[in-house]
Image (cartoon, rainbow, N blue to C red):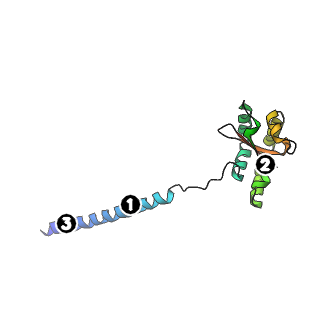
Amino acid sequence: MKKVKGMTRTMLAAAAVLLLGFAVSTSAVAQDTTSTAPQEMPATGGTGVDQLIGAIQDTEAQSTALGEITDLTVDRIQLVSVQDILTSQEEANAVNEVLTANGEKVMALQSALGANPVIQEALGENVSTQDVLAVNVLDDGSVIVFHQ
């Protein structure tokens, strides 16, 4: 019987270790699940600094998408002054950095905009194509024009 009692104790100890290990791993998994769950981010709209920077970085694709719109009208173009969306010197520095890195692409975009009569009409007399820093063509075919 001693042998059975010894084996029983060993098995109970092993079972306790397994249960303890399972409890620890379940607890760790539960913690990992909650800590890596995506958090809801506040909506920033389509005209924030992040959208501006993204549009500048994506200038070639945005320019191509703009050229492919065949039914663009002035009422589907939104003008956004960059000064109205910058809230800090850090944001201004970030925009300047991206503009410097993409300067040639932005100049090519400005040239293309000069040949687009609908964009010219939307810009009016107060904004020149040389003031445009980026465009963002949205899924619905409307266009945001970011300017100085």
Mark 3 vs mark 1: in front = 1
For the N terminus, the image quarter is bottom left
User: Badge 3 is on which residue?
Assistant: 8
Q: Nearer the viewer, residue 124 or 50?
A: 124
Of the residues shown, which amino acid type is indicated by label 1?
Thr
The label number, if any, that marks residue 99 in the structure image: 2
CA–CA distance between discs 2 and 1? Answer: 49 Å
Judge whether 14 appears above or below 79 on screen.
below
User: In this view of the protein, which residue sits in the foreground, 26 or 38?
Assistant: 38
Q: Which residue appears at 85% of the width and 41% of the height?
A: 124
The residue at the point 85 percent across, 43 percent down is 130
Mark 1 is surrounded, within 10 Å at the Cα level, by few (under 14), some (14 to 19) or many (20 or more) other residues, namely few
Give the quarter of the image for residue 57. top right
Q: What residue type is labelled 2?
A: Leu
Q: Give left or right: position of 96 versus 27.
A: right
Taking the spot 78% from the left edge, 51% from the top edge, the residue there is 82
- Residue hosting label 1: 26
Name the residue type under label 3.
Thr
Residue 9, image x, y percentages: 21, 68
